[in-house]
Amino acid sequence: MAILSGIRVLELSRTLAGPFSGHILADLGADVLKIEQPGEGDESRQFVPPTYKGTSCYFHAVNRNKRSIALDLKDPHDLQTFYSLADEADIVTESYRTGVAERLGVDYETLAARNPQLIYLSISGYGRTGSRATWPAYDIVMQAETGLMSITGTSDGEVVKIGPSIADITTGLYGGVGLLAALYERSQAGRGQYIDVAMFDAQFGMLNNWLLSALATGVDPQPMGQGDPALAPYQIIKAADGDYMLGCANNLHWQRFCKAIGLEELLEDTRFLTNELRVEHRDELIRLIEEVSTNLEADELDKTVKSAGVPGSKVNTLADVVSSPFTAEREILQPLEDDASTFAVKFPVTFGRTPVQGYRSSPQLNEHQAEWLQERSQASSTMN
């Protein structure tokens, strides 16, 4: 039996952050019923190109293992239908603009009055209270707003966004963690609760050491592009045929690397005896390393580095990773139960006793209405 078997989730949230929380629960076995606007559905269905097997990659990635029905919450009949679902649900998630849930009558206070055991996750840009509660936000805006973008970019100061929608994803992860914790707490207290997760807040979970650095030094960290300002050599170095990421995060790695690559003399160089000194003399350090590394092809350099027990890797493309034997070994791509020619990225937690039990396609809009109506009819017959 799946870990969250029997947990019923109503997902009003849309696009990425909220659905990412729901995707965690769905993969763990919860019955996640996605409530979508008739005729339109979650707007991420239209986030194309690209598509994967005819479905938006954006939508497919975080809506597998869910079911979909269409309800217009402005319609009194559909709202009553939603209430009947919420009365029996364990969790509701939403990501409306602040005030919309209240106007629709699907806010926590309304639903909890009917179902005190309900756990309600509200995801927003800036939280549901405070001076910015009504401000709109998207991932790219939040990366800039929280300072995340200011430390991501090239060493000459050009800032860039992080490739994946990291602000959405981290918010969704914290939302999922909050829901799992609230489920456990409910099992002790017998009541549900309201959870408020702001994208703004969630970014500081990632930025914590950088934020403390700014507090400690009074100096804003600057983008380094391919390295880390606190470690050296901990960055891209040049090989004969491309780039190589070297990760010497401590003196042991540094000693092993120098011996493996034939730079033992650097171990006696007073400029490089400690990490702090190596950071101070970074430019000269990398110049000396690249005098050797640029004579080695990346594959040869990789074999040398890894054989020495030092972290490092070629800078792979996604095509490289997809075709990698190790990706296959780790079973990163999982065939869908309903279409073995289509894949999902596996849930990244492996449970020894209660493994994730499979992956189904992301739902078509309103795909499960008939199935859901039949279930409700059977449940009603059983109760009677």
Image: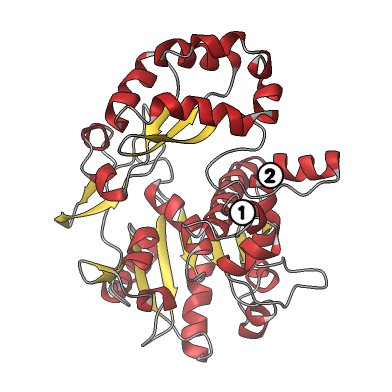
- Label 2, residues with CA under 10 Å away: few <14, some 14-19, many ≥20: few
| Colouring style | secondary structure
- State whether residue 13 is above or below residue 277: below
The picture quadrant where one finds residue 44 is bottom left
Nearer the observer: mark 2 or 1; the answer is 1
Decide which of 281, 357 is in the foreground and name it: 281
Residue appearing at x 26%, y 32% in the figure: 326
Residue 74 rendering spot, x and y as whole percentages: 53, 90
Which residue type does callout 1 highlight? Asp
Residue appearing at x 37%, y 69% in the figure: 380
Alpha carbon distance from label 2 to label 1: 54 Å
Numbered disc 1: secondary structure? loop
Residue 245 rendering spot, x and y as whole percentages: 44, 34
Tags 2 and 1 in contact by the CB under 8 Å rule? no
Which residue type does callout 2 highlight? Ala
The circle drawn on residue 178 is none
Give the labeled residue for mark 2.
189
Residue 331 rendering spot, x and y as whole percentages: 25, 37
Question: Residue 327 vs residue 91: left or right?
Answer: left
N-terminal of the two: label 2 or label 1?
1
The circle drawn on residue 156 is 1
Residue 11 rendering spot, x and y as whole percentages: 48, 67
